Amino acid sequence: MTARATTAGREADPASALRRAVVALTAASIAGIATELVIERHWGPIVRLIPWLALLVAAIALAMLVRRPSARTIRSVRIVAVALLVTSLAGVALHVNENYTAGPLGARYSEHWESMDEPSRWWAAFTKSVGPAPTFAPGALAEVGLLLSIATLRHPALGVPISGTTLDARSDGAGVAGGRL
């Protein structure tokens, strides 16, 4: 089989086309988040550098997935995806906490912050009614992690059959999803 036939076969495979689209979307998301961090001047104290490190690791993982896909690389990329999710959740918690801390300083709540009950304070911080930190901005890292994870699903480097075959070796053919993809 020639290189041209292999390439044509790969292009005809819907899973490969979808995987390339997910990889492109992941790269665009990483670039978009980095741009947003620059616009917001998200640097200074070391804690503000965490999303930069997360994006760097995500970009390296994506490059490894594209350039040298292997079962080991895919496992590594999946670990990075989980780490991005954890980092994202920690970022949301840090942003909510930063907003909560700023509560007594906000013009809207300064006079009655002390008289508010705790759930109301935390709700104000969570909804960014008070404070400077965008509560769900760190969630974009979870998106990158999810996209990286999706890009590894049923990757050919894992040796998983892709077309009309069972997903496990059970003799009854039931397998996952009724024995079919």
Image (spheres, helix red, strand yellow):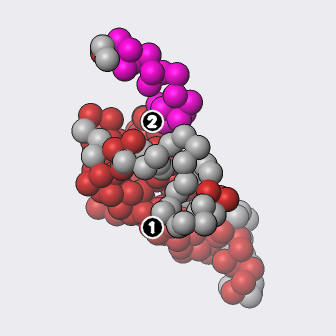
Do tag 2 and tag 1 residues touch (Cβ < 8 Å)?
Answer: no
Whole-percent x and y of residue 90? 46, 69
Q: Is residue 176 left or right of residue 154?
A: right
> Comparing marks 2 and 1, which lies closer to the viewer?
2
Q: Which mark is residue 67?
A: none
* Residue at screen point 52% across, 57% down: 167
* Residue at screen point 51% across, 52% down: 146
Whole-percent x and y of residue 7? 39, 18
Q: Secondary structure at mark 2?
A: helix
Return the residue nearer the eye: 120 or 68: 68
Quadrant of residue 127 in the image?
A: bottom right
- Disc 2 marks a residue whose amino acid type is Val
Residue 130 seen:
no
* Residue at screen point 33% across, 57% down: 75
Whole-percent x and y of residue 54? 35, 53
Return the residue nearer the eye: 149 or 93: 149
Q: Which mark is residue 23?
A: 2
- Disc 1 marks a residue whose amino acid type is Val
Residue pointed to by mark 1: 86
Quadrant of residue 38 in the image?
A: top left
Query: The N terminus lies in which quarter of the figure?
Result: top left
Residue 171 seen:
yes
Ranked by sequence position, the earlier of labels 2 and 1 is 2
Does the stretch in magenta take in 157?
no
Q: Is residue 68 left or right of residue 125?
A: left
* Residue at screen point 54% across, 40% down: 163
Q: Secondary structure at mark 1?
A: helix
Instruction: Please state the extent of the stretch shown in magenta in the rendering.
Output: 4-20
